[in-house]
Image (tube, rainbow, N blue to C red):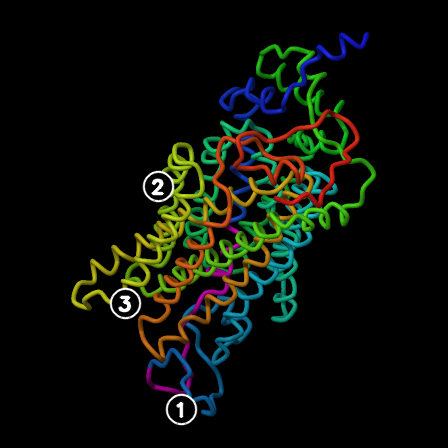
Amino acid sequence: MSATEVASVKNVDLDEVLDKYGIFKRYHVEKIVLVFLAFATNTMYSTNYIFSAKEVPYRCKDDMQDVSFCSASNATYYCSGWVYDEPNSFVAYFALACHEWKRTLVGSVNNFGYMCGLLLVGPMSDRLGRKTAIVITGVSGAFLGTLKSFSRWYWFYIAIEFLEAAIGDICSPMYVWTLEIVSTKNKLVYYMICSFGFTFGGVTTAFIAWLIPDWRWFLRTIYTPAFLFLFYKCLLDESPRWLLTKGRKDEAVKIFQNAAKKNKITIDKNSLDNLTCEVRENVKFSVLLKDTFKSKTLRKRFFVCLIWWTTSTFVNYGLMINSVSLQGNKYVNFALTILVDIPGTIVTTYIMVHFKRKFPLMLSFFAGAVLCMSQPLLPLNLPWLSLTVYMAGKLMCSFYFSITYLYTLELFPTYTRNSMHALCSSLGRVGSIVAPQTPLLTVYWAGLPSFVFGVAALVAGLSTFLVPDIADDALPDTVLQAEALGKPKIPSKPVGTYNEGFDTQM
C-alpha cells in the first residue's frame, strides 16, 4: 500500500461498529438473558443471610412465660435448655440463644467479604478478561454457597460466608462486560433491561425463603443452579473492547463477524480492519494502576466516587435495616422493598438519557438528604406520612445508587476501569458495615439515624461539583482520554503501541 493510500485510510471508532448491531437483534437479546440470570444471583447471594440467619423467637423451657429475648437482667439466668419457635432454623441449630451478635455477625461478614473480594475480582477482570472472571466467580459462588449449607460448625460457616462473598459474586465483571458490548448511546437502555435481573433475584429469594424455611435447603436451592455458570465459557464472548486494548484485534474482529452472522447483517470488512484502539503491550498491571493514580484529575475523581459509594451503601443498608419495623408479612415486605427499584431503574434511565449524569445525581442526593432529615420531624400521629417519606427516601437512594454505579465506570480508562470501579465499590462498602450500628444512635435521639443518613447524602451531593458532566462521550481507553472527559472532544491516537504520558494533568 502506498503512502497516499495509507493516509487515505479512515480509522473507525469502536462505537461506530457496535452501533450497527443494535440491542434488540438475536445476538444481544441472547446476552440479555445471560446477564439477567447473573444479576439475579447477585441479589440472592448478597441478601441470603437475611433469611438463612433470620431472627427466631426462643424461650427457656423452664420458664412459664413466653420470653423471646435475653435482657441484661436475665443474662446470667441459668437455663437448662432453650425452645426455639423454628427448630430447623440457623439460630436453633447453632444454639444462638442469648448470642444475638453471632447471628448478626453473618451479615457483617458477608459485607466485609464482598468488600475485600472486589479488590481481587476487579484486577482479575482487567488482567485475565471479563469472561474468565465471570466464569471463575460464578462457579466459585456455587461451590462455596453449597458448601456452607453442609456446615456443622458455626465458625466454619462464618469462614465460608466470607470466602463466598469475596470470590463468589459474578456482578462486578458482568456489569463491566455488559456496558462494553454495546455502543455508548445504547448502554443505558441495554443495562436497564438487564438490571431487572436484580429485582427478579430479590423477589425470587423471598419466595424461596417462604416456601423452604429450612436454612440448609434454602441455601442449596439458591446456590446449586449457579454451577451452570460453567457453561458461560461457551455462551459468552470476551469483551471486544478489552481484547482491543490488549492488542488482540484478530479475536475481537472474529467476535464481530460471528455476531453479524447471527444477526443476519453485513459489516464492512474495512470497518473491522481499521478499528482504532490504544494498545499498551507488555506492561504490568501494577504499572497501569500506578499510572492511573499519577493523574491528579483521576485521583480527585477517585475520592469523589469513594464518597458516592460510601454514602450509597450506608444509606441503602441503613434504610433496609430500619424497614424491619414495618408491619406485615416479612417476605412480602422484603419483596416490595425490592420492587421499588423497578420504577427507580426506569426513571433513572430516562433521566440519564435526557439529562446526562451530574445534575440528576446531585438532585437525587439533595432530595434524599431532605427526605431523611425531615422524617424525624414528622407528626407521630400520621404513620401514613412517615411511610410515604420513607419509601420516597428509598426511591431517591435507588436513584443515586444506580447513577453512581454507571458514573464511576464512565470516569476511568478501559485499562483499569473494572479495577477502579471495584476499588471504589470495595472501600465504599464501609458504609454497609457501619449501617447496622446506626440503631445505637437512638439512645441520644430517636431520629438521629435518619438525620445522619441525610447529612451523608448532602455531603455526597456537594462533592459531585468536582467531577465533569458526561453522557455522550465514548468510554475512554486511556488516561489522556479520561482526563479529557467533559471537553468538546476526546483526543485519540493512531493504533499502535501505547506510549502516552500518564502523568498528564488537567
- Residue at (45%, 45%) from the top-left corner? 402
Q: Pointer 3: what residue?
A: 376
Magenta range is: 43-65
Residue 414 image point, x, y percent: 65, 38
Mark 1 or mark 3, which is nearer to you? 3
Q: Which mark is residue 73?
A: 1
Quarter of the figure with the C terminus: top right
Which residue type does callout 2 highlight? Answer: Pro
Q: Are marks 3 and 2 in contact (CB under 8 Å)?
A: no
Work out how far the residue at label 1 is from the one at label 2, CA to CA, in angstroms.
Answer: 47 Å
Task: Tell me the kind of residue under disc 3.
Answer: Pro
Along the line of sight, the residue nearer the viewer: 188 or 1: 1
Q: Earlier in the sequence, mark 3 or mark 2?
A: 2
Residue 62 in magenta stretch:
yes
Helix, strand or loop for disc 2 = helix
Name the mark on residue 48: none
Q: Quadrant of the N terminus?
A: top right
Residue found at the very far left of the displayed protein: 381
Dot 1: what SS?
helix
Find out whether the residues at labels 1 and 2 contact each other: C-beta distance under 8 Å. Answer: no
Q: Residue at x 71, y 48 (%)?
A: 289
Cα gap from disc 1 to disc 3, whole angstroms? 31 Å
Of the pair 49 and 131, the residue shown nearer to us = 131
Q: Quadrant of residue 196?
A: top left
* Residue 282: percent from left, percent from top: 83, 38
Mark 2 sits on what residue?
343
Q: Is residue 495 magenta?
A: no
State whether residue 492 is above or below residue 404.
above
**Image point (56%, 29%), residue name:** 489
Left or right: residue 29 versus residue 85 is: right
